Image (cartoon, rainbow, N blue to C red):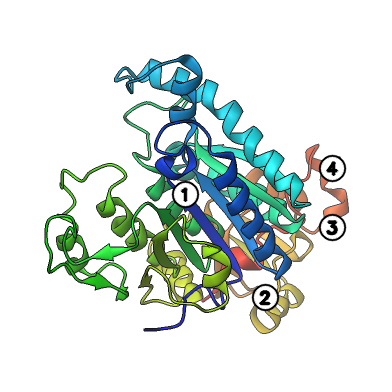
Amino acid sequence: MSVSVLKDARRIVVKVGSSLVTNEGRGVDAEAIGNWCHQLAGLAAQGREVIMVSSGAIAEGMKRLGWTTRPKEVHELQAAAAVGQMGLVQMYETKLREQGMGSAQVLLTHADLADRERYLNARSTLLTLLAHKVIPVINENDTVVNDEIKFGDNDTLGALVANLVEADTLVILTDQRGLYSADPRKDPNARFIHEAVAGTPELEQMAGGAGSSLGRGGMITKILAAKRAAGSGASTVIVWGREPDVLLRLAAGEALGTALTASTQKMAARKQWMADHLQMRGAVRVDAGAAAKVKLEGKSLLSVGVIDVQGEFHRGDVIAVRDETGQELARGLTNYSSYEARLIARKASSEFERLLGYTAEPELIHRDNMVLA
């Protein structure tokens, strides 16, 4: 059995399911959330960055509204989420504060991550929170989404957040020990899977396939989430959420649950994503000093080094960085539109407020959002 993939992880996304958060729908479980928050604080004390993706708003809202059966109408689900979100985030805030940790509520929809500008805004917000030692608690924005844009389950949301912040590991806390070769409740010969490579077809077949009646929130969604997370180089652990000190033990190297490892390294996956899969909307030409900083020193691109802006693009678009001769040096996600880039070209970031009326980021392209050609 291998050592936990969490041992060397610096940035971790933890996803916890509704049945765990609400004690099988009885309402927000203060003791359970308190235990997880204690562990999140312990991980933070080790110098790790942690994001919590938590289900449970609808179940808590149903309890507060006195509903005994889950409604089918979208507007009623949205109403339950709006009511339940109050209790859910209040509990996390209270339990994290008891551990001396700051917390923040972040609500996301699929549209936030499909739109390039909103994707970059969400990423910047989360990374800023982490830089300030605040633990973000994320949930799908159930109060405004509809069936067309819902993630469908928070396993998928956890994977998308792992992609968004370039997490090293996604931990899915569930009510099962991990992944089995078959349903252990029906098949006495079911074999526990300690480790596998995320994205292999056999895993989906074990869970019944993508169209399985296990469906929303079942093991198939966790396997598909691990496959999605692996696309950006993040490995996934599926593990029983009530295992004592489960996160701390995983971080110490103990092999618990099922580890679904990413076959591609994080930086290689990101480079492939940026270099091969996104169409460039424009380019900037930079002077020799900026070219050397980007190419030789791996620095971010500052606007002061930009001598020309080509094409029309928006914040969050992928653009090329070219030297004075027009040769491509790199490409990356721009923090400013082409209109704004033309205004701030050859200018220091201290002048952005005067020129634009605001400052998004001091860099035109941050090195974390840039790959060399």
Q: Which residue is mark 2?
A: 294
Q: Which mark is residue 353?
A: 4
Binning the other alpha carbons within 10 Å of mark 2 as few (below 14), some (14 to 19) or many (20 upward) gives many
Q: Compared to 357, does 293 lie above or below?
A: below
Label 3, label 2: how many angstroms apart (C-alpha)? 17 Å
Q: Residue at x 48, y 45 (%)?
A: 113
- The image quadrant of residue 77 is top left
Residue 355 image position (x, y, % from top left): 82, 42
- In-image side of 277 versus 204 (left or right): right
Q: Is residue 264 visible?
A: yes
Q: Which residue is mark 1?
A: 16
The amino acid type of the residue labelled 3 equals: Ala
Closest to the observer, 217 or 368: 217
Binning the other alpha carbons within 10 Å of mark 3 as few (below 14), some (14 to 19) or many (20 upward) gives some
State which quarter of the image contains the N terminus. Answer: bottom left
Instruction: Decide which of tag 1 and tag 2 comes sooner along the chain.
Output: 1
Q: Compared to 243, does 94 lie above or below?
A: above
- In-image side of 273 versus 89 (left or right): left
Label 1, label 3: how many angstroms apart (C-alpha)? 44 Å
Q: Residue at x 62, y 35 (%)?
A: 89
Instruction: Decide which of tag 1 and tag 3 comes sooner along the chain.
Output: 1
The amino acid type of the residue labelled 4 equals: Glu
Residue 340 image position (x, y, % from top left): 69, 45
Label 2, label 4: how many angstroms apart (C-alpha)? 25 Å
Q: Which residue is mark 3?
A: 348
- In-image side of 215 versus 338 (left or right): left
Query: Quick one: SS at disc 3?
Result: loop
| Marks 2,4: beta carbons within 8 A | no
Instruction: Decide which of tag 1 and tag 4 comes sooner along the chain.
Output: 1
Instruction: Decide which of tag 3 and tag 2 comes sooner along the chain.
Output: 2
Closest to the observer, 356 or 187: 187
